[in-house]
């Protein structure tokens, strides 16, 4: 997902709506604890099935990281 796709998905959502994360293949959700921009991410794969498709260091890509508990 890109930032543009995320913005489009958020269109019309109220500012006080909760933000949650759910895995694609399971009914699991939780509250996001923090959001950060990582400046040196390395995108290894666009395949959603690839568990470790992004490294948070060692690259030159910027990525939005949502951390959950």
Image (cartoon, rainbow, N blue to C red):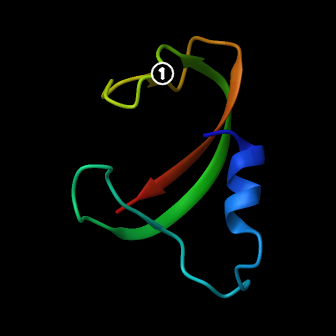
Q: Is residue 1 left or right of residue 6?
A: left
- Residue shown at the point (73%, 83%) measured from the top left: 15
**The N terminus lies in which quarter of the figure?**
top right
Check disc 1 and report the residue beneath it: 55
Task: Name the one closer to the observer, 48 or 52.
Answer: 48
- Residue shown at the point (76%, 78%) measured from the top left: 12
**The C terminus lies in which quarter of the figure?**
bottom left
- Residue shown at the point (50%, 22%) measured from the top left: 46
Instruction: From the top left corner, tell me how far across and down residue 59 is, in percent.
Output: 62, 12
Query: Outermost residue, left direction?
Result: 26
Q: Is residue 46 left or right of residue 17?
A: left
- Residue shown at the point (47%, 16%) measured from the top left: 45
Mark 1 nearby-residue class (10 Å; few <14, some 14–19, many ≥20):
some
In the image, is residue 2 above or below residue 8? above
Task: Name the one closer to the observer, 40 or 47.
Answer: 47
In the image, is residue 9 above or below residue 30? above
In the image, is residue 20 above or below residue 63? below
**To which quarter of the image does residue 52 belong?**
top left
**To which quarter of the image does residue 10 belong?**
bottom right
Instruction: From the top left corner, tell me how far across and down residue 66 is, in percent.
Output: 53, 52
Task: Name the one closer to the observer, 64 or 57.
Answer: 64
Instruction: From the top left corner, tell me how far across and down residue 57 is, in percent.
Output: 55, 19
């Amino acid at each position: 997902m890109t930032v543009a796709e995320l913005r489009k998905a958020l269109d019309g959502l109220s500012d006080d709506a909760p933000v949650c994360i759910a895995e694609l293949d399971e009914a699991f959700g939780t509250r996001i604890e923090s959001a950060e921009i990582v400046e040196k991410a390395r995108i290894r794969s666009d395949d959603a099935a690839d568990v470790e498709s992004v490294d948070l260091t060692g690259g030159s890509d910027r990525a939005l990281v949502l951390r959950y508990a």
